[in-house]
Image (tube, rainbow, N blue to C red):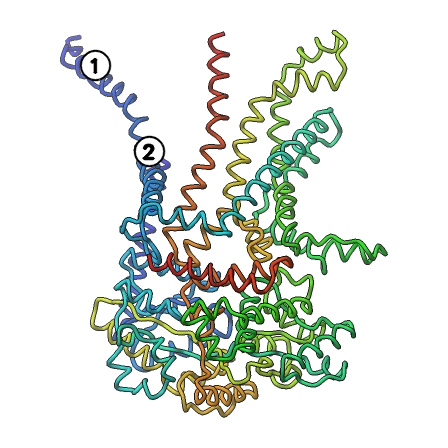
Amino acid sequence: MMRSGKLLKSGVLACMAAAMLTMATNAAAADKGEISVLNWWTSGSEAKSMGVLQQMMAKEGYKMNNDAVSGGGGTNARTVLKSRLSSDNVPGAAQIKGPEIQQWCEQGVTTNIDAVAKADHWDKLLAPAIAKGMQCGGHWVAVPFDNHRVNWLWINRADIKKVDAQMPQSWDELVSTMKKLKAAGITPIAGGGDTWQIGTEFDALVAGVGGADFYRKAFVDLDKSALDSPTMAKAFEHLRVIKEYSDPNGSGLAWNHDTGMVVKGTAAMQIMGDWAKGEIANDGATPGKEVACVAFPGSQGTFIYNIDSFEMFKVKTASERAAQATFARTAMSPEFQRKFNMVKGSIPVREGTSLTGFDECAKASEHDYKDAAKKNGLVPSMSQDMAEVGAIKGAIFDVVARFYNSDKMTSQEAATELAKQVEQAKQMTQM
Amino acid sequence: MAANSPAASAGTYRSSRWREHLDTVLPKLTLVPTGAAALIFLYGFIAWTIWLSFTKSTLLPNNRFAGLAQYRFLFKLDTWWVSVTNLVIFGVLYIVICLAIGLFLAILIDQKIRAENLLRTIYLYPLALSLVVTGVAWKWILNPDLGLQSVVRSLGFTHFTFDWLVQPHMAIYTIVIAAVWQASGFVMALFLAGLRGIDGAIIKAAQIDGASLPRIYLRIIIPSLRPVFFSAVILLVSMAIKSFDLIIALTGGGPGYATWLPAIFMYNYGFNRGQIGLGTAAAVLMMLAVALALLPLILSELKEKRRASTR
């Protein structure tokens, strides 16, 4: 009894000391205001970029707490967000993307940054589709950080030269290149590790087969006639071809392992978004040089975008509100957009930001972005949670995974099943 | 000595009464926090989970009543049925193989062999590892390009194929392999303790009666291990139904969703896909499954005990 009593006492003391300590540090740091920023960017370069933002905010007299939660592609951070919301420890901003922005807004827990957005004319700096994604009920509730393109094909130049092939520009050219590579004993495609990677491939294939309008009809509007269509069946058909030429033992391997295979040349190509550039650089190659970046064959006019953003939550004090506004303004500033995106591998989401110093692939991305914007070719990525909420994306992924893993399912059956599962998931979310 | 007044003696009497009283109350008092914690954090949350499974909860829990709608959605999902089928395959194989290997190893070790302590430790060691470590290790061992297959092939057997990990229909068996590797040493320890508890005199008597060794094991020793079987099965059933980290580390639920179990289903829908209502419905069914699997076992064991005590 005595022992446990003593233990209890010292435990309570320790807790109190810890609480007082955090209170003290908070009090010392909160100068003009303070904001807690919940995110899942824990890798070296990403964490460093958040450090840049911290410094820029500190210059203006605000403290930014970088609450990074690792793992699960944001799942863990989301769990933390839920518990913080229910325990009244609301973060000023949290990393949330795609339609989930509107989903959180509908829960009535978010706040708007209209004043900043209007003063800085965000509506003129962002493409209309992207701007709409940051809003909810006509109010700005989120700030975008970057702009990744999903439909890229990364190609080891040496491998292509070895089999005497050209950089593929069309689906047929891609198939003949893959054939040559396979005959030469080089794995044509590194991929198929998990459903997320296959979903990323499927994004590019659907855009390649159907173009931007079809992609939008299928994945944004969830139009039944597009989901269960010969065009969708053809996209599934192409996915099966990609599988035939993929690393047969790739299941369970991470996407960055696959990127490493392309850099080494054991595999020739990977279908992946431009976040692969970080891995390519890590492995000692230069994106655009040893490993070329080409728009996925057939999908040239389409720019499938994946944008990281932070949503604003209802905070209590005026100083926190001020910190929130400063956070949003700083994140959209040309200086931060340049610094951040150079590290992240994406292009600035703020239009008109100078790209001097960016690599070739980023410049190509910017060029294609402008081109696609003119031709209504900008579409949100299904695989990266930009087009649909988790439940519906999950339903699409399930069908894609089932098709990929079963040789018995025909591509037409897959398209029909896709329409059916999406319909069911829609009912589930709209209950 | 007038000091020994009635008042003083009444005082000691009262204090001893008080102490006696305290002695009976104190144990109950010390149990109160644990009891309250169990009530709130176990039964309270079970009740809350059951309630949530009847609501329209999505991203955050809410209290809008949905009737049985979540269960209806659940039964329509292929992912759910794959998870359930996998649990049956995994659960049955895992329990049966663990029991068989555990019992066999225990009998072997019980033959008064040399270096028993060392062997026992070796067999028990896998249990000391985290399931995540087990999963990652087996992931590399079973990977066709890096592990067993490539090693055997490099020895000259170029047609040797062992690629269950990447075959959607076989991947669930790789989980059985890793899980059995982890737990069978533990089951062995349980059985070994049981074997050591058997009265040697009975066995000697049987030997004098001329019973053969296999007969002694089949008719005397194994039947008397009944309580050990009981505890081993209870532990293994709950371990099988809870299985989560091993699968996440070994296959990530893949290829596709070929190795999902209900626990992974629940996590995916509840946390990844923002369908808390559906996730809790799956959790409730998992709890029912545990209850259904274990209740008959517990009841029959209780009956057995009652019969033994009345005899």
Quadrant assignment, res B100: top right
| Label 2 to label 1: alpha-carbon separation | 33 Å
Query: Which chain is mark 2 on?
Result: B
Q: Secondary structure at mark 2?
A: helix
Residue closer to the observer: A309 or A403: A403
Position in image of residue B220 (x %, y %): 66, 16
User: Amino acid type of disc 2?
Assistant: Gly
Q: In percent of the image, x 56 and y 85: which residue is there?
A: A361
Q: Does residue B158 appear to the left or right of A173 in the view shown?
A: right
Q: Which percent across, then down, holds residue A399?
A: 53, 60
Q: Position of residue A23 (x, y in %)?
A: 28, 62
**Is A89 drawn above or below residue A143 in the view shown?**
above
The foreground one among B163 and A45 is B163
Query: Which quadrant does the C terminus of chain A fall into?
Result: bottom left
Task: Pick whichever, A313 or A108, lies toward us.
Answer: A108
Q: Residues within 10 Å of mark 1 (few under 14, many from 20)?
A: few
Q: Which residue is tagged 1?
A: B13
**Between disc 2 and disc 1, whose residue precedes?**
1
Q: Is residue B141 left or right of residue A95?
A: right
Q: Are callouts 2 and 1 both on one chain? A: yes
Give, as a three-letter code, the residue at label 1: Tyr
* Numbered circle sitting on residue B35: 2
Compared to residue A396, the image places residue B198 above or below, namely above
